[in-house]
Amino acid sequence: MHGSHATGSPYAPYTEEDRTAMLETVGAEAVDELFDIPADVQFDGRFDIDARTERETRRLVRSILDRNDDVTELLGRGHYGYYVPSLVDHLADRSEFLTSYTQYQPEISQGFLQALFEYQSLLVELTGLGVANCSMYDAATALGEAATLADRVRDTTGHRVLVPELLREERRSTLENYVAGTDLAVETYPVADGTVDLAGLTDLVDDGVVMIYAESPTVRGTIEEDLAAIGDLAADTEALFVLGSDPVALSLLERPVDVGADVVVGDASVLGLPTSYGMGLGLFATREDYLRQVPGRLVGASEDATDRRAFTLTLQTREQHIRRERATSNICTNQAWVALRTAMHAAVLGPSGLVELAERDVQRARDLAARLDDFVGVIASVHDRHHLREFVARVDRPARAVADDLEKRGFAVHVVGDHEIQICIAGVCDERIDEFVAAVEEVTR
Amino acid sequence: MSGDRPDVSDDGDAPQSRYDQARYVENGEYEPLLSEKDRTRVKIGGDDADTDGSPLPDDLTRDSLELPELSEPELARHYTRLSQMIYGIDSGPYPLGSCTMKYNPKFTEDVATLPAAAVHPDRTEASVQGTLELLYRLQDYLGRIGGMDAVTLQPPAGAAGEFVGIRVAAAYHEHNDEGHRDEVIVPESAHGTNFASAALGGYDVVSLPSDDDGRVDLEALEAALSEDTAALMLTNPNTLGLFERDITTIADMVHEAGGLLYYDGANLNALLGRARPGDMGFDVMHYNVHKTFATPHGGGGPGAGPVGVVSDLAPFLPAPRVRERAAESTAEDPVYERFDPEHTIGKVHGFDGNWLVLLKAFAYIARLGDEGLADASASAVLNANYLAERIEYDVPYGPFHHEFVASAGEQDAADVAKRMLDYGVHPPTTKWPEIVPEALMTEPTEVESKDTLDRLAAAFNAVAGEDDDALETAPERTTARRIDQTTAARTPRLAWQALEDDA
């Protein structure tokens, strides 16, 4: 009964005897009688999907995925493949974590609520901001939510949202969709040598700006050096300063609160998730001033009937299931389990491990750039900036050809310009880096 | 006579289970926070002799970072204890109405962790043919199951799928010079996300009352429809579990008015293999793969909310989608590529959505096949009907399908739920939809056996027979007793840093 199952779902544990008894209880001859579907919309066809045993299904999926080439990815630009400790997989996969629902019954869900509370606390430490929610979908949607928050909290009559011209097109497009229902208009400001062109940005800022978005590290891996100046610029015009970053970078770089950030967004799953074809975890933190306007779920501490500290979802009147069309967001299902994994990964590293990881990301990117820069026909990095984990290199040959030749040798890099490739060291071990350097030397000659 | 043994029989021979959840208490408090186990401050850069010096100048770095620094054994115990303070599907029945809390097959976790699945979204098409093929096949599966012509897998949750539907509708109307349509109609009893997704898209929401039988009131619909109508969002079966018998009439009315008909896929589990939204006249729908296709809810997510549309709307779907590159494909060796639909609304996620969730959904569908999917809906509907028959609470609306809404009558539904926790079952969704007083919205799904349903019914019935005192003091056997919601909201403490402030 539990192998091939030509007669039904392998996860519906009936015997025929049970079914007969149940039908008798409900007073029906057959299950079909229980369906109240008009004849003209009944489906009499087939999907033509064959049932398979568990083993056959696993073989099917493996055979499909084996068509993916096994290459070493030196890829980043918003999605990273850090090594995830075994503890994360084993404990996050405990079925109580994996198979429970949103904690609408907090008394029976304390463990998950506490883990999410600890996740929020991690983000509060990393950002210096007072409030972090317990997840958005990813960095792009968190940016979209930041814009609608800016729209709600700003008294100014303006509607301009300024984003860097280097912003990933996918993030920009997601942002455009999120603001489509508002009067907000997204504009770009210039970038100079990989970071904000402060003079260019200053020229664009006026009272009509409700939000300025900057990233550090940027999509090109450069570390922004003028964050405090951008914060001042935003404060002068009462625009919200929204900063994009991630937990590894935030372990080392300037604290967002110290540079005047009002909101921090980004992909928190750089910790906790391996490379997952872009699946992420939207980081969202903001000042306590905006607490009542925060999108998504919040876990808070309270007491139970024995006066012991206990955790619960709170301030739910912001949310769609209570406030409906006046909710701060439409989000319901979020990325809670990824947040759990991120919190676990951060806990395994601890503060010293987090700082060390970020420092190594700076050092290893710098070292690799220096090695590549030695080759004739390569300039690395093209930007005279500090970098975290990735950088852009100029190659004399067409970048596409270089990348294709590298792929043949088992390495994937980004092509970001006619003669520019981008290289990320996150999660790549030193031995592979050595082989990569040799491959680059071959293909850039 | 058995004086050596602890008394575990205080429930006598009662048919319902009792449940005592794990509870750790140290220093008078439950399991301590990580921050109460350790706080270590690591200094960064500067002249501190303890640091090796940062590779960055001090003005680009923070001064220090303070977090718990614990050993792996300590962390393993921490998270194991936390997990024991959670009730999951593998703990017992979980009949949350509208949530479709099915058993999550274990093997799908194994396929999601295959090394070949761990690819970066910026890889070249040629080097990730496996991923593209799997996405293509899932698009195809979902299209067949929903009766839809084209599918996007990008939305990372049901609400994100709704938002895509709303944006696609807007783009479609705009394309047809009908951009003036600024209203979306949503039944009063719909999921809260419907209202919120329409509002996020900039639409005015027109709320639609139901008729006396609990279905769409056609006269009210007629009155609500106008040349300003962009779409009607419907769940079918609706949140009472009732099939909208007039669905083809409703579809005709909406289309006559120039609007689109949106299907909220939350309740698709009732219809698998028996009816398809595409055949009922729906133009656009989302699928909740974390409901219908058994991917785990993970304590609130991640899910995935793919969207299917009829061919007229396909050009507006998010970018990219996956298709076969016909010129280079052969039957034995198909070649797949990403493409941007002609009038795409763009992106609703930074990459291509929740890949690992989509992978699990594909595996689930491939495992069940036609027979398994059809049996899922049949068993889900039989289970709901059987359970409703066995409980003492009144169920005012029918005939229902995969879920029913009972009324707790004189009792407070929220208290009923708290008391049910003591009987080793998760309670139903409560106080919604509001059309049923003190609603207990119950969806047992197909995965429960007759025995489990009997035990679940016994839990309902035990609570039905209890007085207000027992209900108001519940739960007693969960890790935490009843939690004070008012204090939590009035004095928000949302991080361990905030707990210190008031110490």
Image (spheres, rainbow, N blue to C red):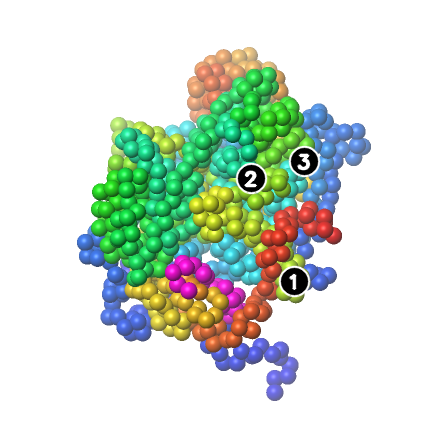
Q: Secondary structure at mark 3?
A: helix
Residue B24 circle label: 1
Residue B428 sits inside the magenta stretch: yes
The region drawn magenta spans B414-437
Residue B261, position as x, y percentages in the image: 29, 44
Q: Nearer the viewer, mark 2 or mark 3?
A: 2
Q: What x and y, as percent, mark residue B369?
A: 30, 52
Real-space CA distance between mark 1 and mark 3, rounded to the nearest whole angstrom: 32 Å
**Depth order, front residue of A201/B18:** A201
Q: Looking at the picture, which amino acid does disc 3 mark?
A: Val
Q: Which of the 4 image quadrants contains residue B189?
A: bottom left
Chain letter for the residue marked with disc 1 in the picture:
B
> Residue at the spot x=46%, y=61% of the render?
B430
C-alpha distance separating marks 1 and 2 = 31 Å
Which of the 4 image quarters holds residue A110? bottom right
Q: Is residue A397 above or below residue A243?
A: above
Question: In screen coordinates, is B119 left or right of A375?
Answer: left
